[in-house]
Amino acid sequence: MDNQPQSTAADEKQRESGRMQLVCFKLADEEYAVEITAVQEVLRLQKITPVPQVPHFVLGVLNIRGEIVPVFDLRKKFGLAEKEPDVQTKIVIVKVYDAVISFIVDKIMDTIKVDVSRIDPSPNVKMKMERDCVKGVGVFDQRMVIILDTEKVHRHINEAIRNYSSPEEQRDSVNG
């Protein structure tokens, strides 16, 4: 997926206004957000069809109105503590380039509009997730929100899947 991101009219309008609208959600004890322009929809947790021989953070796929959409667990991908799903668990469907993907979140918080000037770059500290997956960090209404870059998250997921070898493949290469 080395396609260049396509700017939408909504993205351009947000940049020109100096404001960004974010969908905020919880993962572990931290609050994250993605730009609303990337979000297609939010669904209640439903049956996910498992896919064999994939990394542990790939939960499987969903059939959403005839479209097969992969489902990822960002907690597992970024090494956050695992949690059993509950009634607040949601699936966020996002469009990245020409692909539609989804990920599980613990809880949808709200949507907020923020001034782009109030978003700081990713801090230069050790983080559990790849730092380039973080578009920025902001404090809004005394809440610290980590803003994810969905394009870079998608790229990291694709790289991990491409480089994945199942336990059987690892065993075969050792016994080779």
Image (cartoon, rainbow, N blue to C red):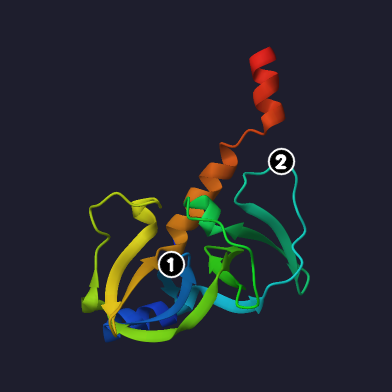
> On screen, 14 above or below 78?
below
Q: Decide if residue 2 is in sight here.
A: no
Query: At numbered mark 1, what does the secondary structure look like: helix, strand or loop?
Result: loop
- Residue found at x 29% / y 85%: 141
User: Residue beneath label 1, please?
Assistant: 29
Which is more N-terminal, label 1 or label 2? 1
Classify mark 2: residues with Cα within 10 Å, few (<14), some (14-19) or many (20+): some
- Residue sitting at 42 percent across and 72 percent down? 33
**Which residue is at the front of the view, 155 or 74?**
74
What x and y, as percent, mark residue 77? 52, 51
Q: Left or right of 119: which side holds 50?
A: right
Instruction: Answer whether residue 162 is visible to the viewer in this image.
Output: yes
Residue on which the image places disc 2: 53
Q: Decide: is 160 above or below 40.
A: above
* Label ID, residue 69: none
Tag 1: Cα neighbours inside 10 Å, few (<14), some, or many (≥20)?
few
What residue is rendered at 55% in x and 70% in y? 106
Q: Which image quadrant is residue 6 in?
A: bottom left
Could you tell me the amino acid type at mark 1?
Asp
Residue at image point 52% right, 64% down: 96
